[in-house]
Image (cartoon, rainbow, N blue to C red):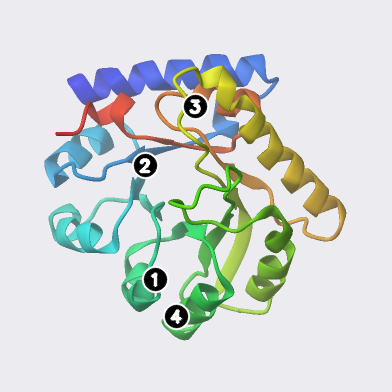
Amino acid sequence: MEIRENLERVRERVARATERSGRRPQDVKLIAISKTFPPERIREAYDAGQRDFGENRVQEAQAKRPALAGLDCAWHLVGHLQTNKAKPAHELFQWLHSLDSARLADKLHQAAPAADKPRLKVLIEVNLGDEAAKSGVKEAEIAALAEEVRRLASLELVGLMTVPPFLDDPDQVRPYFRRLRELAERLRAVGFPELTELSMGMSHDFEVAIEEGATMVRIGTAIFGARG
């Protein structure tokens, strides 16, 4: 019951945040980040109505998925993807939130399965804090990478993602979320109308992210509990 109750609380918080931002709860996709949690916890969330799940690593997803066969849900890769994992990423995920280079885009395209399979939906990860330890492109590099993705038939560019610096006060993170939204708005205005998804906000700051325009929030701890 713990996960069901946690999900209900998170959904309520999402609903209140969307109301404050003049939107509807269905305008924000809730992604349950299940990294480090076993398949049975994921099934609990699925039984409670959750349909979008995120993992940080291809290897962990590979280990879990046999025990989750038959679940009708969407899988999101939200962590950094190494180019040598491009093929299994295509096989395991429908969404990639962390595209950060033209080289990775090319590797993903080369590893794409048969043409009749749906394209991999990708978001460009933007490093707004200029943090050396984090992946992601700089603001000035987004347009060039978006153009590269556009020419690759197996990929579908849908938006931007960011992991801002962790700050104890969620409201201090607000400027980063606002910058990502404004970046997307500017890019849409100059010829990139497909950049409609904004993946931003995690357990400690997702309400602020929603207030600033998030269309996807990545929630782990608030759903599954603290990681060991």
| Relative to 66, residue 84 above or below | below
> What residue sits 77% from the left and 55% below the top?
193
- At label 1, counting other C-alpha atoms closer than 10 Å, the crowd grade (few under 14, some 14-19, many 20 or more) is many
Position of residue 225 measured from the top left corner of the image (x, y, whole percent): 23, 26
Mark before the other along the chain sequence, 2 or 4: 2
Could you classify mark 4 by the number of other residues whose Cα lies within 10 Å: few (under 14), some (14-19), or many (20 or more)? many
Residue placed under numbered mark 3 in the picture: 206
Q: Of discs 2 and 3, which sits in the foreground?
A: 3
* Residue identified by numbered label 2: 51
Q: Nearer the viewer, mark 1 or mark 2?
A: 1
Q: Of the residues shown, which amino acid type is indicated by label 1?
A: His
What residue would you read off at disc 4?
Answer: 112
Label 4 sits on what residue type? Ala
Q: Position of residue 86 (x, y in %)?
A: 38, 74
Q: Name the secondary structure under disc 3.
A: helix
Residue designated by label 1: 90
Q: In terms of sequence position, does the residue under pointer 2 or pointer 3 come before the other?
A: 2
CB atoms of marks 2 and 3 within 8 Å: no
Q: Nearer the viewer, mark 4 or mark 3?
A: 3
Q: Residue lying furthest front in this view?
A: 132
Compare residues 141 and 35 and report the one nearer the observer.
141
Pick the residue in front: 146 or 70: 146
Question: Which structural element holds mark 4?
Answer: loop
Residue 24 visible in image: no
